Image (spheres, coloured by chain):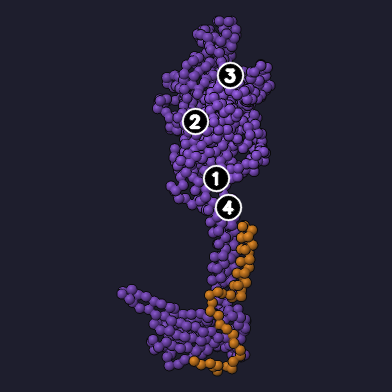
Chain colours: A purple, B orange
Amino acid sequence: MKTSTCPSCGAPVSFRSIASLYAVCEFCRSTLLRHGDEVENIGRMADLLEDASLIQLGSEGRYRGVHFAVIGRIQLKHASGLWNEWHILFDDGRSGWLSEASGEYVVSALVPVAEAIPAFESLAPEAAVTLAGRSFTVTDLETAHCIAGAGELPFKVESGYDVNTADLRGNDRFVTIDYSETPPLVFVGYPAKFDELALANLRPTREETGGVAIGAGGEFKVRAFNCPHCASPLTLHSPAIESVGCESCGSIIGVENENIRLLARAAQTVHEVPSLPLGSKGKLAGIAWEIIGFLKRRTTVDGIDYDWSEYLLFNAGGEGFAWLVEDQGHWNFARTLSEIPQAVRGQSEFAYQGEKYRLFNTGKAEVVYVAGEFYWRVSVGETCLAEDYVCPPTMLSREVSDREVTWSRADYLEADAVRQAFAPTLPLAKPIGVYANQPNPNGERHRRVCRQFWKFALVALVLQLAFVVVGAASTVLKHRIVFSPAQDEVTSPEFVLKSRARTLHVRHATDIDNNWLSLTTTLVDKNTGKSWLGMQEIAHYQGVDDGESWSEGDRGDDIVFKDVPPGTYYLEIDYELGSDRRTQVVDTVEVVRNAPGWSNYVLLMIFLVAFPLFTRWRNAAFETQRWSESSLAGDEGDDGEDE
Amino acid sequence: MVKGNLVAGLLALAFFSYAQYAGWNLFDKEASAQGARSSGSRLYHK
């Protein structure tokens, strides 16, 4: 570390990083340029605006296991509010940047890029940019106004200059292109949660009338103030809050450092009553949240307005912000995505983290009501193009404005979970229809029924094969009989049944042609005289008509004798031949005991398959109802997912 | 539904097993038993 003396006031000035060419004297605010061991005063730095950031020069933290110290700061401002770029020095000598904006933190470093950087004017939200062989998507374009700098800085910071910046995301990386220099500076980094940084030596408690009170260890105490229009009491829960909507009069107040400014006077004419009141506290998935903001948004399709509510949640313990979205009685818990999907606008489906998402809705969303605190300068009437992609129970939403694109992930939440978490006094709206990412209750049921069906089918097949193989089917008689027109009765040879036959099939296979044959088959027990009678009609006709052959009837027929006791038997067959053709008919009669039947097996399978078919129908009906609500309904005619 | 399917399936398998053992068949043409008859003679004629 090199220490010099400020040429303006004589105060000691430290240069801990070799990358620090400039330093701002903390006493007289002189900007000092380092020349070796000497420093030159090149002007006075403007004062920083007082904000509620918890970080200060000298704060320390850890990133990916490496300790760092905060040695410098650049404060900037854009349309949505203030943000800080903290210059950090790692213990291994590397320097980097900790960006703090809208409650999000990104650790990045300056990266040399060989290829040409696209001009700022050529960029648009969602544009693809290739840097160092990697593809990134433009997510935010800002013209930032530099307010001031502090501490050690690697380049000159001038108060009051405007700088164009472009934020890009690709996979889990975050890129900022700073167009203040030529060529532009490229910073590449990763998002980090406040808790992950393990920051210490944060801003201490300061007691100041009407000022920002920071608790010891960096805990932000809720700040109270009055609406400048109607004097209603309002609160600030986080240093990231940029605007507050007054519930009483509808005014929107901008929060800038210690000052509040009326941005829109009583902008809303309709007073909405949120189902979950502002200030409600509850726990979702073990995390404590407080509802600090309420938005009503609207999309119009075919002249019909569809409204939904969004509740901004805040967790003071480091989780930051989240959203509860309520639409037609259905609830979703949503958070902004750091790693954005690779999907172009209007793409019908894409894969993200191993899941396939399908486009469900697309349209313009407009803010129609605002109440409570927000981390950007929200305004009634602000619009964006919104697209929803679903993979139930998850939904990924893209919102695109002129300068920015954001992605968020929503997970379906049962109304009961919301009720249990926040215990609202007013009843929540009952869910209507099927929501975009509502989980299908029939899906799992259908899968279980299908698994059962396959198990039953296997058992049925094993049983059937057992009856076929083990059932001891055997042919006890096979004999050729001639049915002559000159006679009317034939007797078969005898055959023996050694044991009781559950069934005795008598099969006739004839060579009858264009004639009919009437049979009366009598099974006779030779010893007891007991008989069983069976009557059959066999007919077969065939011909050629206009070159096309046809046939009708069957040349054979079966008859079954049931429960035949053991004994010696013969068949007595009385027959009558049709007069269509007076030729003899040769018949091969076969007697089979306990012949296995397949018709029962087929009937069983038909019965068993009815259950999975039914659950499949219910599953598909649910999906049909879901997709009927899609803004793309009628374009695809989809009937839902299969198992 | 799942429990109902399980019960119905087990009952159906049991019924199928008995039907196969007993030789039941919806599509079989079944003969009828008659009383004793003297061997070799006919009780009816067309």
The residue where tag 2 is placed is A382
Could you tell which of marks 2 and 1 lies nearer the N-terminus? 2
Q: Position of residue A276 (x, y in %)?
A: 63, 36
- Estimate how packed mark 2 is, as few (under 14), some (14 to 19) or many (20 or more) residues with alpha carbons within 10 Å: few
- Estimate how packed mark 1 is, as few (under 14), some (14 to 19) or many (20 or more) residues with alpha carbons within 10 Å: many
| Residue extending furthest toward the front | A269
Could you tell which of marks 4 and 2 lies nearer the N-terminus? 2
The residue where tag 4 is placed is A442
Disc 3 and disc 1: Cα gap in Å? Answer: 42 Å
Q: Residue at x 54, y 68 (%)?
A: A602
Q: Position of residue A283 (x, y in %)?
A: 66, 36
The answer to which of A433 and A387 lies nearer the viewer is: A433
Label 2: chain letter: A
Residue A424 left/right relative to A518: right
The residue where tag 3 is placed is A259
Rendered-image quadrant of the N terminus of chain A: top right
Q: Position of residue A304 (x, y in %)?
A: 48, 41
Label 4: chain letter: A
Q: Quadrant of the rendered structure where residue A62 is?
A: top right
Could you tell which of marks 3 and 4 lies nearer the N-terminus? 3
Q: Residue at x 62, y 23 (%)?
A: A231
The answer to which of A460 and A389 lies nearer the viewer is: A389
Residue A488 left/right relative to A209: left
Taking the image as drawn, is residue A168 in sight?
no
- Estimate how packed mark 4 is, as few (under 14), some (14 to 19) or many (20 or more) residues with alpha carbons within 10 Å: some
Query: Pointers 2 and 3 in contact (CB under 8 A)?
Result: no
Disc 2 and disc 1: Cα gap in Å? Answer: 25 Å
The residue where tag 1 is placed is A435
With respect to residue A597, does A55 lie above or below? above
